[in-house]
Amino acid sequence: MYNSRTQTAFHESMTLFYQIYGLIRTAADHAYIAPSSKDKIAGIKAYIDAHYKDPALSVEQLSEFAGMSEVYLRKLFRAQYDISPSQYISSVRLKKAKELMRSPFLTLDAIALESGFSSPQYFCRGFKKETGLTPYAFRKQL
């Protein structure tokens, strides 16, 4: 097509070239994760799910557990789950806190500690950032 002598041949061939280039760029943008790394990251996610109550749970602790650098852990975790490890820890804790709020017998301080937050103030700040409501206002709506 490129060597054709029609008036539009050059433009048609360039269109095809850019379509192919776009497909290659799209494929390259999706991060490849080796199966062994996928298993490690899935193990880290399972570890977070099991240990979210520990207020000391951090990306540093997770990287030591996985035997990889924090930067690499963050990169792989985000590539696999589209969320950072610290955001995932926070979301698991907030989800558990919302479940615990259904119990009228637990105080907000107890819920914060049971959910893995290091302090009630940190819990309130994170909860309001996530939901737009304070824990007290959220609980009143239940």
Image (tube, rainbow, N blue to C red):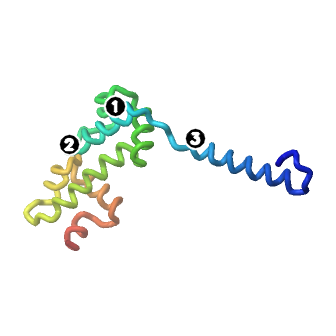
The amino acid type, in three-letter code, at marker 1 is: Ser
Q: Is residue 6 left or right of residue 30?
A: right
CA neighbours of label 1 inside 10 A, class few (<14), some (14 to 19), many (20+): some
Nearest to N terminus: mark 1 or mark 3: 3
Q: Label 3: which residue?
A: 28
Question: Residue 129 location in percent, x, y?
Answer: 35, 59
User: Which residue is at 19% across, 60% downward?
Assistant: 99
Residue 113's label in the rendered image is none
- The one of 62 and 32 positioned closer to us in this rendering: 32
Q: Is residue 26 left or right of residue 108?
A: right
Contact between marks 2 and 3 (CB within 8 A): the answer is: no
Q: Label 2: which residue?
A: 50
Contact between marks 2 and 1 (CB within 8 A): the answer is: no
The amino acid type, in three-letter code, at marker 2 is: Ala
User: Which residue is at 29% across, 36% downward?
Assistant: 43
Residue most toward the top? Answer: 67
Q: Quadrant of the C terminus?
A: bottom left
Q: Tag 2's secondary structure?
A: helix
Q: Label 1: which residue?
A: 63
Q: Is residue 114 left or right of residue 32?
A: left
